[in-house]
Amino acid sequence: MKRCIPHFAITMALLSFASGQSATQQESQNTRSEQEVGKAIEKYRTALLQRDIPELEKIWADDYVFVNASGDVLTKAQRLANVKSGATTLDSIKEEEDIIVRVYQNSAVATSRVTIKGQYSGQPTSGQYRSTHVWVKGPAGWQLVSNQLTALPPKQPTGKLQGERFAYHGKRWATEAVALQSHVVEANLIWPILPMCDQAGADRIFLDVRPFFVQRVVRA
């Protein structure tokens, strides 16, 4: 029994070493795959901008599907037809953040945020989108099997720009109050609300309450 213990310990050590090597090799392979997918995305976007039909035919898998920002689902044949006819033309694709690539053996999912200018399927396209790609590696290399665009709402300004906006509205309030010779009490009641509003909300408050100032002057 005592002789078995050293053999058992050696066996466990070898298995642990082999397992560590396997994990390291897998991580290295995933890193290479992430870099390959990143390069494939760059090549894909260049092909879209240049309307390079032969390159797009290679990149899009035969069963490729695209879900545009309107929710329409297009096949490879439909997308190629749009690019050929000029219905899909892109002027620019700007990366707004680093692409995140997750590799799962022979497949990968890439997500990013982009600003696109141009048109898809004849419809003008301009704004920021969340982009999701699904890539699969086959005999011909990495191919795009599916991708989707989700339109993002315009961001509300924060920090200095927001402060400048509310200062601007405050100046308008003061100007109106003085010009109409109204009491500043009404303005003071509304002013604390403005920082909680966006530009459209602040404009509505200003326009809704302004007639009240006018009424006060007329009645006086």
Image: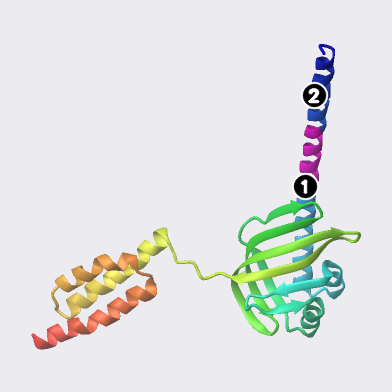
The local crowd at label 2, few if under 14, some if 14 to 19, many if 20 or more residues have their Cα within 10 Å, is few
On screen, residue 187 versus residue 161, left or right, reads left
Residue 6 quadrant: top right
Mark 1 and mark 2 in contact? Answer it, CB < 8 Å.
no
Residue 138 quadrant: bottom right
Q: Label 1: state its secondary structure.
A: helix
The answer to whether any part of residue 141 appears in the image is yes
Up the image or down, 99 lies above or below 213; here it is above
Q: Residue furthest right?
A: 139
Residue 70 quadrant: bottom right
Q: CA distance from mark 1 to mark 2?
A: 26 Å
Marked residue nearer the N-terminal end (1 or 2): 2
Residue occupying the point 24% across, 80% down: 209
Q: Main secondary structure of the magenta part?
A: helix
Identity, as a three-letter code, of the amino acid under mark 1: Asn
Q: Position of residue 9 (x, y in %)?
A: 79, 20
Location of the N terminus (image quadrant): top right
Residue occupying the point 30% across, 68% down: 194
Q: Position of residue 50 (x, y in %)?
A: 78, 73
Which residue is identified by label 1? 30
Up the image or down, 152 lies above or below 210; here it is above
Location of the C terminus (image quadrant): bottom left
Q: Position of residue 100 (x, y in %)?
A: 67, 55
Residues in magenta, as a range: 19-29
Which residue is identified by label 2? 13
The answer to whether any part of residue 167 appears in the image is no
